[in-house]
Image: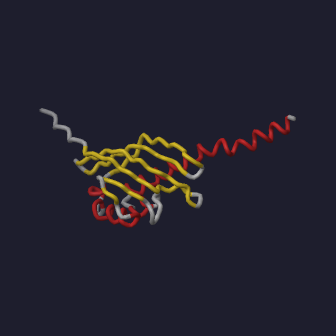
Amino acid sequence: MRLFLALLVLSAAPAASRPQSDRSAILETISRMESAWNAGDFRGYMAGFKNPNVVFVSGGKFQDGWQGTLDHYIRDYGGSAERRGRLHFYNMKVDLLAPDAAMLIGQYRLERGARVTEGVNTRLFRKVHGRWLITVNHVSAYDVAPTAPEAK
């Protein structure tokens, strides 16, 4: 009987740990994307998105799939570290919807010199060939009002 119970517990352990490992894999994808952006590697950043069929919505508009999103980043953020800015994702919440589907809602901050943008990402992840990839990305953003210089 003890052997049966031990085998039962061991057989359940991988299934019980899977949600945590899936969450960790999703958060690691976001971490790699942040690092790639900050290094100026837009293709590395886009490695977190399903290619070619990602649905990307920002500013009330659809981007034109994976390539259109990459082209947008290169056009609007490429050329220099100052123009690209420094990106930070935080406050990530992952909800596993199915063995191959998850939703992530999190915040981000993009500092480009005096211009600071903050926003929320809502991302649908799908597990494709063992990798968690973003298949739907919706961004809601706003520019942070610059702070007034201190009086001297």
- In the picture, which quadrant includes the C terminus? top left
Toward the top, the furthest residue is 152
For residue 7, what is the image quadrant? Answer: top right
Residue 69 percent location from the top left of the image: 36, 62
Q: Is 151 on the left-hand or right-hand side of 101?
A: left
- In the picture, which quadrant includes the N terminus? top right
Identify the image's colour scheme: rainbow, by chain, secondary structure or one colour: secondary structure
Q: Nearer the viewer, residue 101 or 33?
A: 101
Residue 139 percent location from the top left of the image: 35, 50
Above-or-below relation of 138 to 152: below
For residue 36, what is the image quadrant? Answer: bottom left
Above-or-below relation of 27 to 47: above
Residue, x 31% and y 44% (percent of image)?
Answer: 118
Above-or-below relation of 130 to 17: below
Residue 100 percent location from the top left of the image: 57, 52
Q: Is 78 on the left-hand or right-hand side of 101?
A: left
